[in-house]
Amino acid sequence: MQQHTFNRIDICMGWLAFAIALVVYGTSVEPTASLWDCPEFIASGYRLEIGHPPGAPFFMLTANLFSHLAATPSQVALMVNLMSALLSAGCILFLFWTITHFARKLIVTDGTYTRERILLIESCGLVGALAYAFSDTFWFSATEAEVYAYSSFLTAVVFWLMLKWEEEADCARSCRWLILIAYLIGLSIGVHLLNLLCIPAMVLVFYFRRWHNVSRAGILLALAISAAIVAVVLYGIIPGVVWMAGLFELFFVNVCSLPYQSGLLCLVLLLLVGLPLCIWHSRNRAARVCLLSLSMLLLGYSTYGVILIRASARPPMNENAPDNVFSLRSYLAREQYGDKPLLYGQAYTSKLDFEQKGNYLVAKSDDEGPVYRLSADTTVCRYDVVRHDLKYRYADNMWFPRMHDKRFQNQYEDWMGGVEKKDGMPTMVENIRFFLSYQVSFMYWRYFLWNFVGRQNDIQGHGEAEHGNWITGISFIDNLLLGCDTSKMPDVLRHNPGRNVYYALPLLLGLMGLYWQLGRGTVGRNQFCIVSVLFFMTGLAIVLYLNQTPHQARERDYAYAGSFYAFSVWIGLGVAAVHSLFGRLRMKGRLRALLSSVLCLLVPLQMISQTWDDHDRSGRYTCRDYGQNYLQSLPQEGCPIILTNGDNDTFPLWYNHDVEGFRTDTRVCNLSYAQTDWYIDQMKQPAWQSPALPFTWDKRQYQEGTRERIPVRPELEESIRKLYRENPDEMKKMLGDDPFELKNVIRYWILSDNPDMQCIPTDTVTLTSPDGSQQMTLSFKDKEALFKNDLFVLEVLSHAMWTRPLYLSVSVGPDEVSWLRNHLVLEGLAYRIVPQTTEGEIDVDKTYRCFMNLFRYGGLSNTTVYADEHVRHLAYTHERVMARLIDALLEKGDNKRALDVAVLWEREFPRASVPHNELALSLARAFYAGGSTERADAVLEGLLSQSDQWLSWMDTFSPERKASSSHNVYRHLRPMQLSLALAGEYQRQSLMQSYTPKFIRYAEQNKPL
Amino acid sequence: MQNRTNPSEPSFPMSRKGLLLLSLSILLIIAGYVLMGGEGSNAHRFCPSIFSVCRTLVAPLLCLSGYLLAVVGIVFLPSGD
């Protein structure tokens, strides 16, 4: 058989893998926005608005195309999700061809293509590609609008192109493949920087192809060069171009008084003319290829034009407002995420290094240059220095610091079970132990094993035996791993859809493939080098770079999908390994090839049988609906404002505004963004149907670097009162009629030009309604200082308290705007801010109407729809409010409406999807009061047996495991106790009889010492 | 170590037609960015035209087609080359 016949088969089989993946992703895709950043990405694609740093302009352009395929705005999200599905299937296509490329080089060494060989090569491709397609982490990003699917696709394409070049390296103009790679890497900067990590593997491909005598020293040199290339792109070109544009802007705008962007345009023109001229006049062919690659990389990088131009249009969503090169620089550098030491730097115990300056102790710092912003004075075109980038110096430093963030002291010490320290610093042994046990093992290998061995459940783990571990599915091994008897696991974990077991088959196959590859001579060893470098760079190298702290907000497996990609190459080669194993068993010819192919194909099939139920997102509308519920909790009139704080209570709301055009009369104000001047700018601007927020400060008064923190100084109160008693008229002229009136505090103190006056001279301020009939008292008794977002809310409150409805989302934690906590009335999923002092009040009628008539529940009533951990979390947010509503209704004696809510609860949040917890006691109470004794009994029985199962399982924990789960024991004892109390109240003898003795036993066993 | 480059390699890695396509793609991108610009919202007025068909459909489509055409431009070889 000829090579071109093989090529044709190879192409067809690749598209078959693509088609299988596309069908799987297409049927499991989420029909609307997903949680976390997805709603933001969809809005940024559809409306070309600006999402979080460092932005994804090329993603935006492509998503924009897909979003316009939607017939109605409600389908936009589906179309963008389908883009991810398509790109992920494309990634599988190139993975297939990558594997068959490697397999062919190792199997067809003499140029003859027999049927068995072709079958074997194609099976390698299919098994490896499908194993990756059906793996947990990759599938997750294939069905939602995130950048990871796109990034995986570009990585796969670029890597495959390098192999394509390898094939054609001796043909004329083969260099154009390298230039294309440079261009795609440039484009990928506008998607996600992960792509740069495959450069070292590609440099190795180049080295092995171009040099005859491969040596260890040569490999190391090639790797060093590749590291230099990554560094040049990452730290040179990406920030460098913007830095240069900054210099041009400063010269053109500040020196020559030309309009904004004139310097940037000049630089773009210079590059557009200069680079082609340089290329034309370069004599050396290699230099020409390098220059061409650089130009193409820059052309790809130019997608950031979208960010600059669209930010200048000032759309409603405009994160960090990167409308000039200086804010674009901060945006690209992702300054808000802070920077962490890698090689040498502070540990979490390090103190800042202070020095005496005059009468003050000042922290030593290195000035890393001025930060420019558009002048706050809008009458002139000028860039002003708003602050200097300071890098603080620490008194104690260490090499390779892994426990570095002082905000996470408790978490570090919890994880380590105590840190001994030497001279106040963690020792290197402890440092490395944390690195290996947490960062490497828990935050990397655990994810790796989830994908190729098995995953315990979809609940985020922090190291305890119950949640998020990797398991094999073989009970005696799992018992050893988890230190408990897994056969006694509670049903709620046993039936968790996120429980996936593969009996380590994909891992074994991959290891066999790896071993087989290594044994195939020089070519095999070179391939092994390439794949391992890819595996390392997209896995452990990221671990080294991220330097993560314990208690991450969510599981981070998505960052390492690239290394699972590399491992899938080995899984594919595992087919050839099995084939050669059968050869040793004296099995012959076609049967041997067929048998090894079929047996190995069972591995991806077994994987999809496990991963289907927790990746099928069809029918799930929770993100959109729950987002709408927040907005529907607000009144229809008066253009209400809702204060939010996190990702999942903000982005779904933005999505509803900007994509679906839902309740655009409302305004979302995220408190964590309200610390920044750019966000306040946006709040001062009308958006859709919502008028601007009444915030009257001048830009100079809230610009970055000013009024970030205003101290609360109640000790001044007495002296001020005294001054008012002594010369009332003069003081009234100076500080207003009532010095502790909020408006006067803002006007005369907070906004004072004298920095010493910038404080709050009391711990209790008042706010009087315009007609003088109502007064609101705000207390800052437990506060040392207020931050810019507090000041923002205070200023808005001082103008809008009686004119515009103000709400606080129920999801905002108790530490945020804590001084508002006793002015809240619960209405649906938001608290209305009221002038009266309140104590846990709820507006029963409005909340009832919200839940019964206005809210939508995302389709969970269909129990085949998968609710993952974060969806369940949002469901519990609803249940918490419903429980309060039921309690309030029962207190009023309104048993009928309480029963209505209970029936709705059981229908929309069925126990099979959202397992009951303590909150369900209110549900049971409503059923008892409403006369549905059977349903009440069922709820209590469910709660009791669930707790019983948990506690009897936790009894089997080994002592050290028990210690780390002790707080969870109380989480299950308490509902048991409360359920029994409720059963007692309603005389449910059979429940009491079966569970009271058990409860007493568990309580005895788990007595606090 | 010795380099194994092909001595008969043409001096320019891309074809003439490819370069033409590349120039065209850069023009498309520039045209897209020009159309994407325009007036914006400000503190007094929300400007709905920032979401006009021209600025959020035509302009990004021009840019995207430019960026994709560049791929063709880079690898394009006329038959016989």
Image: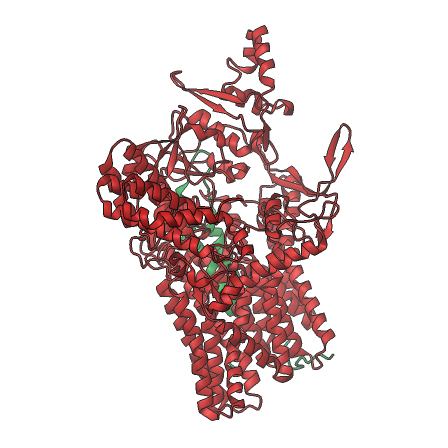
Q: Describe the colour scheme in one phrase.
A: by chain
Residue B26, given in percent of the width and then of the height, sits at: 53, 61
Question: Is any part of residue A771 visible from this angle?
Answer: yes
Q: Quadrant of the C terminus of chain A?
A: top right
Residue A307, given in percent of the width and then of the height, sits at: 52, 50
Residue A236, given in percent of the width and then of the height, sits at: 66, 56
Question: Is any part of residue A660 visible from this angle?
Answer: no
> For this view, does A872 lie left or right of residue A412?
left
Report the residue at 29% width, 56% height from top: A862
Q: Quadrant of residue B3?
A: bottom right
- A698, above or below A84, in the image: above
- Front residue of A999 and A83: A999
Chain A takes which shade in the image? red
- Front residue of A807 and A366: A807
Report the residue at 74% width, 74% height from top: A217
Total labels: the figure holds 0
Chain B takes which shade in the image? green
- A651, above or below A6, in the image: above
Q: Quadrant of residue A389?
A: top right
- Front residue of A662 and A626: A626
